Amino acid sequence: MSGPRYHRTREQDQRLLAFECQSCGYVSFPDEKRTCKRCGDAPATFEEVQLAERGEIKTFVVQEYLPDDIEVPQPLAIVDLPQEDGSGESARVYGLLTETDLDELSVGTEVVARFRELFDDGERPINSFKFSVPREVKR
Ligand SMILES: [Zn+2]
């Protein structure tokens, strides 16, 4: 039994830490780049912003044809996550949807981000996040 030898997950993959361009307000997640993807400002000045855990589905696709070891259907959504303090723009984030029935999904559905180990590439776990429909209403 051998576990992963080391974890190289960057801290910003674990948290909803995003970067807001100080020129145009574009919110980049997860990567901080030198160049702003929207306004092209380079080197761009980015300020760290914390994203809320909940956002809403802007669009989604349901993947039906994937490698054999991946369960299908696999819904993949683009979710707008607002900033935690309610200021500025939302970040547009891609993520898999889990624990979710396909007929629950529509544009505008509220989802919550959950950190998961996506898969293990043999050397180290790949951690990211997935989205699911919140389940607080249970009866
Ligand atoms: Zn910009």
Image (spheres, rainbow, N blue to C red):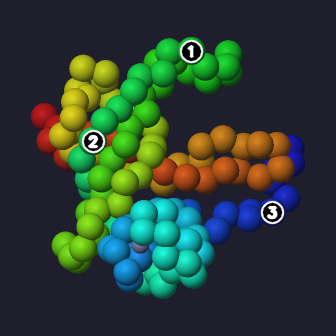
Q: Tell me whether circle 1 and circle 2 mark residues in contact (CB < 8 Å).
A: no
Distance CA(mark 1)–CA(mark 2): 22 Å
What residue is disc 2 on?
A: 58
Which element carries disc 2, helix, strand or loop? strand
View quadrant of ligand 1: bottom left
Q: Is residue 21 above or below residue 51?
A: below
Q: Is residue 126 above or below residue 8?
A: above
Look at 24% across and 73% down and name the residue there.
Answer: 88
Q: Tell me whether circle 3 and circle 2 mark residues in contact (CB < 8 Å).
A: no
Disc 1 marks a residue whose amino acid type is Tyr
Distance CA(mark 1)–CA(mark 3): 32 Å
Report whether the residue tagged 3 is closer than 8 Å to ligand 1: no
Q: Nearer the viewer, mark 1 or mark 3?
A: 1
Disc 2 marks a residue whose amino acid type is Lys
Dot 3 or dot 2, earlier in sequence: 3
What residue is disc 3 on?
A: 6
Percent of width and height locating residue 126: 67, 50
Look at 41% across and 52% down and name the residue there.
Answer: 93
User: Crowdedness of circle 3 by 10 Å Cα count: few (<14), some, many (20+)?
Assistant: few
Quarter of the image with the N terminus is top right
What residue is disc 1 on?
A: 65
